[in-house]
Amino acid sequence: MPKASSTPTPQAASSEPPYPASGYAWYVVGVLTLVYVFSFIDRQILSLLVRPIRRDLGISDTEISLLMGFTFAVFYTFFGIPLGRLADSRSRRGIVAWGFALWSLFTASCGLARNYAQMLLCRVGVGVGEAALSPSAYSLISDYFPPHRRSTALSVYGAGIYIGSGLAFFLGGIVVNLASGKEAYLVPLLGEIRGWQLIFFIVGLPGLLLAPLLLTVREPIRRGVRAGAAKLPISEVAAYVKQNLPTFICHNFGFASVAFTTYAASAWIPTYFVRHFALKEGSAGISFGAIVTAAGVLGVISGGRLADWMRSRGIEDANLRVPLYAILIELPIGAWFLLTENLNLAMLLLFFSTFLTAAPFGCAPAAMQQIMPNNMRAQASSLYLFVNNLIGIGMGPTAVALFTEKVFHNEAAVGSSLLAVGLIGKISAVILFAIGLKQIRKSVERLRVYLAAHA
């Protein structure tokens, strides 16, 4: 490990005003985390409704995987880049508020879908709306917290992934159980709708009521940015990214490789429990949701705290070193989970697997903030999210479906498909993180030089 450095961070060396009060800063994190929770509830609820949606829309595993993954991811990632550039110079809270309202509306609209094309269009709308959130949120949080506390703050925000996903499965499982005895519901103005359509209304409509909560979030000072220099020419941003291209490749594709496996698991593990252990959809959702929420939140926050602790001792590459160690430890645990025939042991192994695969995801945005000037952060974050989600959401769920249908030719082989996809993604991540340790240290030094030149 590199030795501790006495070189002050660029932030510490500046004469800018102090950071906002800690209590209010954590309030902002709380609001943004709540919004993030809703984004993942709206994103993940589809995974629990595979069987009834397939039945009513007459579609295959591969087609529903496109709804869960690729269709959402393409629009989420491509719209994220212009929205990220906008967030580096405009009101970040406004961008998040409008995005929150938009994706909530389209989530509820999924409940009106009567065929595959309509459902596809609604998922596109969810993707476009959610693209507004994370680039702006990462940038906001980074301006509320000093560098030595940033990984922890971003990890708390990142816990929204696991709270939202867990609640989607847990609450969705309860609703599925309650609705299992009734095929259809009569709703005023809408007529007769299926139980799965009702679930989309239940999870989507509250977001429209909560979007105004973003008005309580104040725009913080953009630190390290000269007056009038908030919006940089795209050529300057591209040149800086090019200088740090090896770091971007190792970071973006390393975390995308982890996301490839985690989104695949999130989409198909409930179905794996149904097909392999003969659990009911509702029971599978409740069990998986409880594990994801508890293990995921503990894992992502622990990873961020550990990275902050390591950075405070001068270990500049901590935001890649923690993910490297976590995935190395998880590899045998994740494989064992998919090989055991004991349901109780499988649940225990899934808890530890989820804890370890969650640990990298507070470090990922913190690493990007660590190497970028302030007025490039949201754009760099949108580039990270572009790669991460196109590979993770866009390819992970579909890869499992393709292995099941085209390689194993057996619907019951979803566990073998999850194992294959997991090994591909995690081994790739380990290689990229190991190479990236040296590269991120170089990028931190380049940032110091850049800030000194533009002071």
Image (cartoon, rainbow, N blue to C red):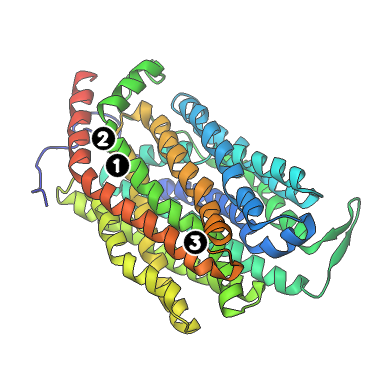
At x 55%, y 32%, the residue is 79
The front one of 93 and 185 is 185
Would residue 325 be seen by someone viewing this image from the given angle? yes
At x 46%, y 45%, the residue is 391
Q: How far is the residue under mark 1 from the one under mark 3?
A: 23 Å
Q: How far is the residue under mark 1 from the one under mark 2?
A: 6 Å
Q: Which residue is mark 3?
A: 265
Q: Percent position (x, y) of residue 442?
A: 18, 35
Circle 1: is it few (<14), some (14-19), or many (20+) Cα within 10 Å? many
Report whether 179 appears left or right of 232. Answer: right
Question: Do callouts 1 and 2 mark residues in contact (Cβ within 8 Å)?
Answer: yes
The front one of 70 and 362 is 70
Circle 3: is it few (<14), some (14-19), or many (20+) Cα within 10 Å? many
The front one of 41 and 249 is 249
Name the N-terminal-most of marks 1 and 3.
Answer: 1
Would residue 300 be seen by someone viewing this image from the given angle? no
Q: How many numbered discs, if any? A: 3
Q: Which mark is residue 246?
A: 2
Report whether 18 appears left or right of 186. Answer: left
Q: Which residue is mark 1?
A: 250
Where on the picture, by quarter, is residue 50? bottom right
Mark 3: which amino acid?
A: Ala
Q: Percent position (x, y) of residue 178?
A: 75, 73
Mark 1: which amino acid?
A: Cys
At x 26%, y 30%, the residue is 244
Image position of 251 with respect to 294: above or below = above
Question: Do callouts 3 and 2 mark residues in contact (Cβ within 8 Å)?
Answer: no
Tell me the element at label 3. helix
Mark 2: which amino acid?
A: Pro
Q: How far is the residue under mark 3 from the one under mark 2?
A: 29 Å
